[in-house]
Image (cartoon, rainbow, N blue to C red):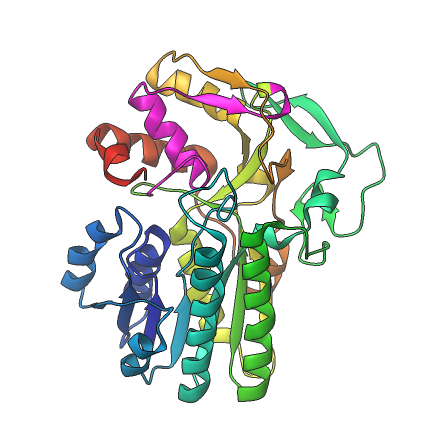
Amino acid sequence: MKILLAGGCGFVGAAICRRLLAARTGVSITVIDSLRRRGSETNVADLEARGVRVVHGDVRLAADIDPLGPVDWVIDAAAEPSVLAGTAAGGHTGRRQLVDHNLLGTVNLLEAAARWQAGVVLLSTSRVYAIPALAALPMVKRAGRGAACFALDETRPLPPGVSAAGIREDFPAGPPCSLYGATKLAGETLAGEYANAAGTPLVIDRCGVLAGAGQFGRADQGIFSWWIHRWAARRPLATIGFGGRGLQVRDCLHPDDLADLLVMQMAAVRPGAPELVNAAGGAAAATSLAELSAWCAARFGHHDVGASTEIRPYDLPWVVLDHSAATARHGWRPARNAPSIFEEIADHAERHPGWLDRCDG
């Protein structure tokens, strides 16, 4: 099996490479990566040592993609991953840069896959779900693991597509969902049209927050890794929004668990039957910043955390994805829980005290 993996030198892409090579025999992987994200260059030598062909290229340029095929599968893990991209708060990436990275790049990959009659795996995001619908979910403050957190108020009516298990795939998606979310949702739609026209397999995974050792975390992406690394380094931290109490909740998923799901999906999905599922840690891995701070205090000792009542664009109190559709179809469940992921990150932070300086930018 020949695979082209776009963004394969990133945190998630590199993990997928390693798991695919371990899980399947006869796999040949070509990675295309612009190495734009600081830290991604650290994965090149390891991937090449495993027999992966690493090509320095840009998916925004069709001419960079065309010579890399034909292949059997194209995995699109190349993206600008910040929900704040294209906003003043996410000033490192402008609107046009975001659209070019996340949409034009995807179109170029879809075009190539159609020519090669290749299956496509598109890594999408929880941020395709509509912000007003998410913000309107009834919330209650409750005690969590050593700290407080937001939770669904199940004493009040819940809209279709959500339960205590999380947000399902039939929850409303679409604008306003951030420009970042809109590019990913447009990519989903285009991928469906290309697969239908070409008669090729398609997998769309709406991912929650990915987290693990070696992540190139920033405050606007990879929040769990970023928070733990900064706590370990005794660098300034502050909870933002919703009263500055750190009650906001997200679920986390280890990239190895995502890669295990991809292995199952690529073996099972057939032309004419595209799959769209949530790929996330779910309610069992849902954690608030206050809970994460309590975990860090127990692991590293006390550290002062500031508080800001600033409201940033697209902040939400509770985003937890229900992965039951993936479980029902493939018997897949995340093997790694939140505390084990946090411990893995903490160990990495202790072994690599300069990691933030290497990739936080």
- Name the quadrant of the C terminus: top left
Which residue shows up at 33% across the image and 75% down it?
Answer: 3
Dividing the picture into quadrants, the one containing residue 222 is top left
Number of numbered discs overlaid on the protein picture: 0
Q: Is residue 272 above or below residue 126?
A: below
- Name the quadrant of the N terminus: bottom left
Which residue shows up at 30% across the image and 57% down it?
Answer: 14
Chain part drawn in magenta: 216-243
Q: Report the front residue among 58 and 165.
A: 58
Q: Is residue 121 rendered magenta in the image?
A: no
Dividing the picture into quadrants, the one containing residue 21 is bottom left
Residue 338 x/y as whole percent? 46, 36
Task: Judge left or right: residue 162 versus residue 339.
Answer: right
Q: Report the front residue among 198 and 346.
A: 198
Q: Is residue 242 rendered magenta in the image?
A: yes
Dividing the picture into quadrants, the one containing residue 250 is top right
Q: Report the front residue among 231 and 38.
A: 38
Residue 327 x/y as whole percent? 58, 58
Visible in this render: residue 235? yes
Task: Judge left or right: residue 24 versus residue 280.
Answer: left
Task: Judge left or right: residue 231 versus residue 329.
Answer: left
Q: Is residue 267 above or below residue 163?
A: below
Residue 256 x/y as whole percent? 38, 52
